[in-house]
Amino acid sequence: MTLNIKYFGLIAEITNCNEETLDFSEGSGSCLLELLFQKYPALVGIDFQIAQDHKIISKNTMITGAELALLPPFSGG
């Protein structure tokens, strides 16, 4: 499947883009992270979360090809 992933904050700086399309076979959030860490080794050790359809998901959640975003930590106010 083809995924459209949006990057924010430090993650966008590391990937040098705000959004990209990646080919991804079926799998969980952990599988997606493995793919991203191979492509962007500088992401290893960076604290961020995966959002799918505007909801934070765990690493065990299956990726469905829905809207995805990588979100760095943020503070509210």
Image (cartoon, helix red, strand yellow):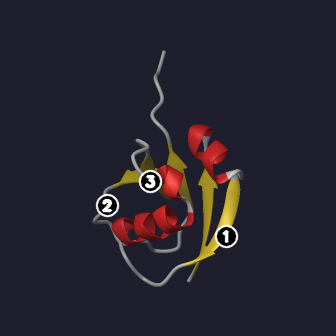
Q: Position of residue 39 (x, y in %)?
A: 56, 66
Which of the 4 quarters of the picture holds residue 19?
bottom right
Give the residue furthest to the front. Answer: 41
**Image side of residue 7 versus residue 38, left or right:** right
Q: CA distance from mark 1 to mark 2?
A: 20 Å
Precedes in sequence: disc 1 or disc 2: 1
Residue 58 horizontal/vertical position (percent): 31, 57
The amino acid sitting under disc 2 is Lys
- The secondary element bearing badge 3 is classed as strand
- Asked if marks 3 and 2 touch (Cβ < 8 Å), the reply is yes
State the mark number for residue 35: none
Name the residue tied to disc 3. Answer: 50
Q: Is residue 54 visible?
A: no
Report the front residue among 32 and 62: 32
Q: Earlier in the sequence, mark 3 or mark 2?
A: 3
Q: If the image is split into quadrants, where does the N terminus sit?
A: bottom right
Q: Are marks 1 and 2 in contact (CB under 8 Å)?
A: no
Percent position (x, y) of residue 37? 47, 62
Disc 1 marks which residue?
Answer: 21
Please provide percent x and percent y for residue 18: 70, 50
